[in-house]
Amino acid sequence: MQNRAIHSLGLGLGSVFLGLITCAAGANLYAAGDAVPPACTSCHEEGQKLAKSAHAALTCDTCHESHEKVPHPANIPKPVCGTCHADQAGDYAKGVHGQARKGGNEGAPDCSLCHGGAHELLAPKSQAFRAAVPDTCGMCHTEVVEQFRSSVHGQALARGITQAPLCTDCHGEHKILKHTNSASSVNASNIRDTCGSCHGDVRLTRKFGMPSDRLVSFDSSFHGLAAKSGSQTVANCASCHGVHNILPSSDPRSTINHANLAKTCGQCHPGANDKFITSTVHLDGTTNKADMGTKVIGLISKFYIWMIVAVIGGMLLHNLLVFRKKLALHRIGHPRILFRMTLAQRVQHLTLLISFFTLVLTGFALKYPSSWLAMAFINEHVRSLIHRIAGVVLITVSMFHIWYISTNPDGRQLVKDMLPDWTDVTDVRDAMLYYLGISEQRPMFRRFSYAEKAEYWALVWGMFVMAATGLMAWFKVIIGGRVPGWWIDAAITIHWYEAILATLAIVVWHIYAVMFDPDAYPMNWAWFDGKMSIEHYEHEHPLDTLAIEKASGFDTETEDAADEEKPVESQK
């Protein structure tokens, strides 16, 4: 390779110096607008080749400048080609070929060698250029290309299937790295993705009749799971199928042919024999194959799926029955006669709860389309419809709440009691001192504690934000025609992060307070029937003396008749 480069350089330089006199005499023939100056083509057939190449629009002096500045082979990638192709030249410089040239190996391939010569350059996207890639690589990598030509990929290319993978599809085009480099596309950690670019493409597998489950079944196998967890030694696609010599299992030379499989598996599993190799790597769990092992495994999978559903479903049903009975006994043992929430408030709360969690489930299903959550909604149309209906319900109940607190006495009192004041600041201080064990004095709350006030006003803020950004995303065409397009993108971003914030706040803050707080466990039933026990309420809100006194005067026998009672106004 080095001798060929030196020989080509010698011929080129000889031609240049031989034509100095002729070209000097005909320099005036260079007319502006000529793609190739006549003065060059009169002596150099390279000019004629250039006129038919991918660089036909360029003039000779674009690269050569003058006879005194003929590009040296070492300068071709960066100073010459890099003038126009900076990104490609930069990638080349980082690759094994560029590094070899940098290390003084002038025989290493440069741009002109791979692209069809200095003047005959073919368009990189052309079929002729793509079909010539194995020949180009074969000038240096003869043995490897011979293996490739006999492989399934090389044979497919020979049959005219231009989409068959070539050297550059796996190794890259300009930034070709050693397989030991973790950034290389053929590094052991990246082989799965490289092979998967074709074997995981549904369109290609359908077009060429290839199995469509190779990537999925590998990922679910031990090899795939270990690879995902970061193992550098577990088998990958190339470990079993080969690298350049990939052949169908029916070929006696194939590494996955039955006669060779024990040896292939034995590379990682010493002692592997004919019984060992009856296991299946790409197991799809179906029972319609002739392979007995596959049928048995498929039946076992189905059996256990139904077993899990029956056993765990039975356990769940049992525990629900036990939980229901114990809740009933707990309610009987702790009479609840103090009204915390009116019927109107409970309806608003329940509507809000259902619409909120519907939005959460349908929203996250869109964000994670491959999750079980997305599959639960059948298809995207159903999910989208449910999400929009829940959004309308949430906005409607929010508007109703605004009307409620504006016109209803209970609503107006609710807002008054929810207004923050300086006492809330001191309550936060007292609560932290008490729960840290610094003070023995419990914090004393009125109708609503600082935590409940903070949650209420956060809910109000979140409603406005989610409704506004949700409507912008829903009616993006109408709104996008009146504001800059990036406003819609910003709204969608805010909608997503506000959804995460709201969901976590409800789970971490609200559900804890009404269910997992030891004082409320197993549940604060005020959301259901509006009532609490006097003991629980007095423990949580000792300063709301008016409500406690009124509830203390009720006869427990008239509890059922008191369902229409309203919460007493809180004492300020």
Image (spheres, rainbow, N blue to C red):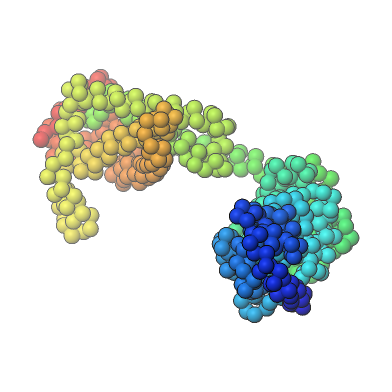
Give residue 36's position: percent from left, percent from top: 67, 57
What residue lies at 43% left-to-right and 31% top-to-bottom? 476
- Residue in front for this viewpoint, 107 or 325: 107
Q: Is residue 467 visible?
A: yes
- Residue in front for this viewpoint, 34 or 216: 34
Is residue 88 toward the left or the right of residue 347 in the image? Answer: right
- Residue in front for this viewpoint, 430 or 390: 390
Q: How many labels sit on residues?
A: 0
Is residue 355 toward the left or the right of residue 194 in the image? Answer: left
Residue at the farthest right position = 252
Q: Quadrant of residue 110?
A: bottom right
Residue at the farthest bottom position = 104
Give residue 393's position: percent from left, percent from top: 38, 25
Is residue 334 toward the left or the right of residue 291 in the image? Answer: left
Q: Quadrant of the C terminus?
A: top left
What residue lies at 18% left-to-right and 50% top-to-bottom? 428
Give residue 193's position: percent from left, percent from top: 64, 56
Q: Quadrant of residue 463?
A: top left
Is residue 218 toward the left or the right of residue 461 in the image? Answer: right
What residue lies at 74% left-to-right and 58% top-to-bottom? 48
Give residue 3's position: percent from left, percent from top: 77, 78
Q: Quadrant of the N terminus?
A: bottom right
Residue at the farthest left position = 572
Q: Is residue 337 visible?
A: no
What residue lies at 21% left-to-right and 35% top-to-bottom? 534
Relative height, residue 156 to residue 513 (above, below): below
Q: Quadrant of residue 65?
A: bottom right
- Residue in front for this viewpoint, 135 or 227: 135
